[in-house]
Amino acid sequence: MDMPARFRTIDRDTPMLLPADLRDWVPANHVVHFILDAVAALPLASFHVNWRGSGTEQYPPAMMLALLIYCYATGRSSSRQIEAATYSDVAVRYLCANTHPDHSVICAFRTQNRAAFKAAFTAVLQMAREVRLEQVGTVSVDGSKVLANASKHAAVSYARAGQMIEELELEVEQLLKKAEVADATPLRDGLSVPEEIARRQQRQEALRAAEQAGYEAKRAARAERRARGERVRGPEPKPPSAEPEPADQYNFTDPASAIMKAGSGQHFEQAYNAQVAVDARMLIVGERVSDAPNDKRELPATVAAIEPAEQQRLRAVLTDNGFYSEAAVEAVEHTGSGEPSGVTVYAAVEKTGYHRRVADLEAKADPPPPPPGASRTDVMRHRLGCAAGRALYGLRKQTVEPVIGIIKEVMGFRRFRLRGLAKVSLEWTLVCVSYNFKRLFNLRPAMATA
C-alpha cells in the first residue's frame, strides 16, 4: 500500500512570536553588505545635504546612495520600482532598515548627487588598487546606444517644423476670429478659446527654439573639437535666420538626444551614445555620455574621461574600427604640444567579423614594417598585423564587450530615466558605479588571495 504524500505546513495566519530580525534573512555573503560597507566610507561632504536642519528629517545620504547602487545593480532603475522594492525585497528592507523613501525623494537624491556618484566611482577603483585587482596598463574602449527617455516620434525635421509653424499660425488666427464673435459656434465641452490659443503659441515658440538649439549645438560641437586639439574643417555654422538643413531633427521631449542607428544598424532610435573604458579585470575605469550618432570623434574624449590615477599608468588603448580615424589616434598618442603621450592605440581599420577563418589559425610571420612616410592607417594596419598586436587586441572582445552586455542584459539598463545630457551623464555614472560594485563583489576570491 502506497504511503500518503507528506507536505510541509505552510501557515500564513499565525503571527511570529518575536519580531523578525532582517539580518537573519540576508545571508552574510550577500552583496548588499559589501555595498553598505563601501559606501559608508565615503566622506559626507560628497553628498548634497541640507545642513541647516530645516524641514523634515532627511534620510542618511549613505543609505540613499547604497539603495540606488544596489537597485541599479539588480535591474531596477525606476524610482517607483525602487520605492516598491523597499516593501517587497528583503535585502532592500534590510538596507533601508525598514524605512521607505518616497519615489520623489529617491528621484531628487539621484539628480542632486553627481559628486557622490563620482566619489563612489573613484572609491571602487581605489579598493581594487589596494588589493591589486585593477590592471590599467591596457584599457578597451567601446560605446553603445542607450535609449533616451523620449520617443523618436516626438522628433520633427526642420522642414516639417516650418510647415507646422504655418499651420499653427493659421489655427491661432482662426481662434482669434472665433473669440471676437460672441455668437460663434462654441468649441467642444471642456475646451476654451484662450487655452487653445496659448497652447498653439507655446508650440510655435518651441518649434522656433528648435532652430536656435540646432545652431547652438553645432557651435558647441565645433568648440569641443577645437578644445581637444582636433582640426575643424568647413565653414562656421550660420545663425538660424539662414535656413537650417531640412532633414535636421529636433526632439521636443529630450532635445539633447539624437536619432541614432541601433541594432547593428538595422533601425534607428532616439538615444544617447554611452561610452566606457574597461581594464583587463573588466572594471570600468572611465565613462561618459555623448550625443554623437557615431564614434569617429569620440576616442580622445573617452580616453580623457579615464580616472586621473588610472591614466598615469595607461599604456595601450584597444578599440574597434568605429572609433578609428587618423585625427583621433593622433590626439590620443600625442599631447597638445605634439609630444608623445606614452599611449599606443590599437584600432581596427576595417570592419571585421567574429568568424575565425582557417587562415587566421595558421602561424604566420609578422608583416614587414611600413616604409618611411607611410600613412597612419598603414602603420595601424601593420601594428595589428603583428603577433603581439593581434594578441593584445584580442583582449578587447573579452573585456569591454561583455561589460556592455552585462549592463544591458543582466542589469537590464537599456533606457535612461532622466533627460538632458547633464542628467543622463549623471545617471550613466551611477550605472557604471553599480556595475563596478557588482564586479568587485564577484572578484572577492581574487581579493582574498591578493
Image: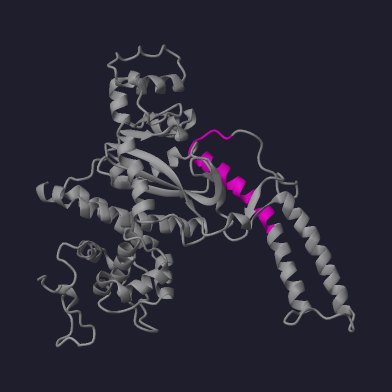
Q: Position of residue 361 (x, y in %)?
A: 30, 21
Prevailing SS of the magenta stretch:
helix
Residue 374, image quadrant = top left
Q: Position of residue 408 (x, y in %)?
A: 39, 52
**Residue at (41% x, 11% y) in the render:** 371
Task: Indicate yes or no whether the magenta region holds residue 20.
Answer: no
Considering depth in this image, is 425 or 93 the residue closer to the camera? 93
Residue 81, image quadrant = bottom left
Query: Is residue 322 something one can see in this rendering?
Result: yes
**Residue at (34% x, 32% y) in the render:** 343
Give the left or right position of residue 228, taking residue 363 as reference.
right
Task: Residue lying at the far front in this picture: please name it.
Answer: 1
Considering depth in this image, is 132 or 104 the residue closer to the camera? 104
Give the left or right position of residue 13, taking residue 100 as reference.
left
Q: Is residue 250 above or below residue 186?
A: above
Query: Is residue 307 something one can see in this rendering?
Result: no
Q: Which residues are magenta?
A: 209-232
Give the left or right position of residue 135, taking residue 80 as reference.
left
